[in-house]
Image: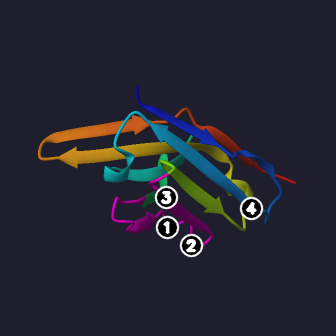
Amino acid sequence: QVQLVESGGGLVQPGGALKLSCAASGFMFSLYTMAWYRQAPGNQRELVGSITHGENTDYGDFVKGRFTISRDNDKKTVYLQMNSLKPEDTAVYYCNADARYIRQQWNYWGQGTQVTVSS
């Protein structure tokens, strides 16, 4: 059974930091591209950051060096370190796992964790 369980969300003041974790199980974690997405009320879900099995990373333009995605294949966990948080970073953050081979795709989502940036 595939599971992606996010943790680490919460309430933080502007300028603060949070570290999100996503613990994976039920699939070959090391072969998957892992990503964090976010969705604020009324907005579309958008990519925050991704990390391939080869540890190549990509980020949404709005990140601008504030966030860092990383992975630990031994622990089957992907992380998102978020610094210099802004109120506009308030959203539900989702963990995603994606793998593709020829014409097949495997894609899984976590249940999300709320991040609220407010004074």
Q: Which label's residue is closer to the chain start, 2 or 4?
A: 4
Q: Which residue is mark 2?
A: 64
Most extreme residue toward the right is: 119
Q: Which label's residue is closer to the chain start, 1 or 4?
A: 4
**Mark 3 surroundings: few (<14), some (14-19) or many (≥20) residues within 10 A:** many
Q: Position of residue 21 (x, y in %)?
A: 60, 49
| Magenta-drawn segment | 51-74
The amino acid marked with disc number 2 is Lys
Q: Which residue is mark 1?
A: 61
The amino acid marked with disc number 4 is Ala
Q: Position of residue 114 (x, y in %)?
A: 68, 40
SS class of the residue under badge 3? strand
The reply to whether callout 2 and callout 1 are in contact (CB within 8 Å) is: yes
Q: Which label's residue is closer to the chain start, 3 or 4?
A: 4
Q: Which mark is residue 17?
A: 4
Q: Which residue is mark 3?
A: 71
Of the two numbered discs 2 and 4 in the rendering, the one whose residue sits closer to the viewer: 4
SS class of the residue under badge 1? loop
Q: CA distance from mark 2 to mark 3?
A: 20 Å
Q: Nearer the viewer, residue 86 or 67?
A: 67
The reply to whether callout 2 and callout 4 are in contact (CB within 8 Å) is: no
